[in-house]
Image (tube, grey):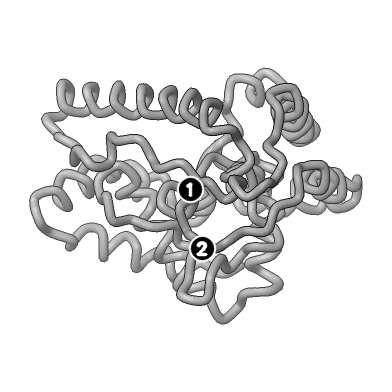
Amino acid sequence: MMLEVNELYSSLIYAENNGFLRDLERIYLDMPDKECRDCALCCQNPPAASLLEYLNVYRYIRDKLPERQETILRGAAEFFFLELADPELKCPFRAAEGCLIAPVRPFGCRLFGLLSEEDYAKREQERVRHVNALADFLQAEYGIRLPEAVLQSRPYCGRNRNGGREITADELTDLEMRLLALDTSIVVPERVFRGGTLAPLPVHLAMTVLNAGVRGKRLEVVRQFLSGSRELLEKYAGRAVGYRF
């Protein structure tokens, strides 16, 4: 979902004043404690983040990363347009020195390496099924053929194979429900439990900084990019850079 800038700040203040960001931190602390090996597997396809997680990251970018904001904004806009069109696309919060938002990275990023290989395969199978269905729709309705590489499964992160504890199915369900419950403190529950507050962080940010007219050019940008041109992409990503936190 999209929050206008004034709604975003009022929601952030509300979350701060009511301790929701502290509740979010408790969810992270209740996950099995594993040290990330910084393999960047989870940076290849950023997972969905909740609305409260986005607000938490937005605050972090505003307060802690002023010198990286323009790069992040451009990257978020590019991700918004090319999420399903560029197999080489990486999370815009990934830099040479690692994850720029590591202290506040969302639940989905923290989950990599904590699932059993079997549980990961089940979730990945569902993701791939959804992406392929979308690809079929785009080809049938708009003649846009997505690259085969974006329709494939992502590799399993095996950072737990050296004795680390995996997260159980019951633990995962409990944590995910707690995460969604926090979003119901900000928007109506029906919208939350239909998945209306979940999106990759770059998409959340792009929805904030790009106006409706620009967002409506998404298919046009994808079509042009797949034909070999970045003209429209550069035009609209350049506009995103002008946003001020």
- Mark 1 lies on a secondary structure that is loop
Which numbered tag is attached to residue 93? Answer: 2
| Picture layout, residue 170 above or below residue 243 | above
Q: Residue furthest left?
A: 227
Q: Of all residues shown, which one is farthest toward the right?
A: 18
Asked whether disc 2 touches disc 1, contact meaning CB atoms under 8 Å apart, the reply is: yes
Q: Residue 46: which numbered mark, if any?
A: 1
The answer to whether any part of residue 31 appears in the image is yes
Residue drawn where x is 86% and y is 44% of the image: 23
The relative height of residue 67 versus residue 159 in the rendered view (above or below) is below
The residue under the point 57% across, 61% down is 37
Of 238 and 25, nearer the camera is 25
Outermost residue to the bottom: 67
Q: Amino acid at mark 2?
A: Phe
Q: Is residue 159 left or right of residue 15?
A: left
Residue 14 visible to an observer of this rendering: no
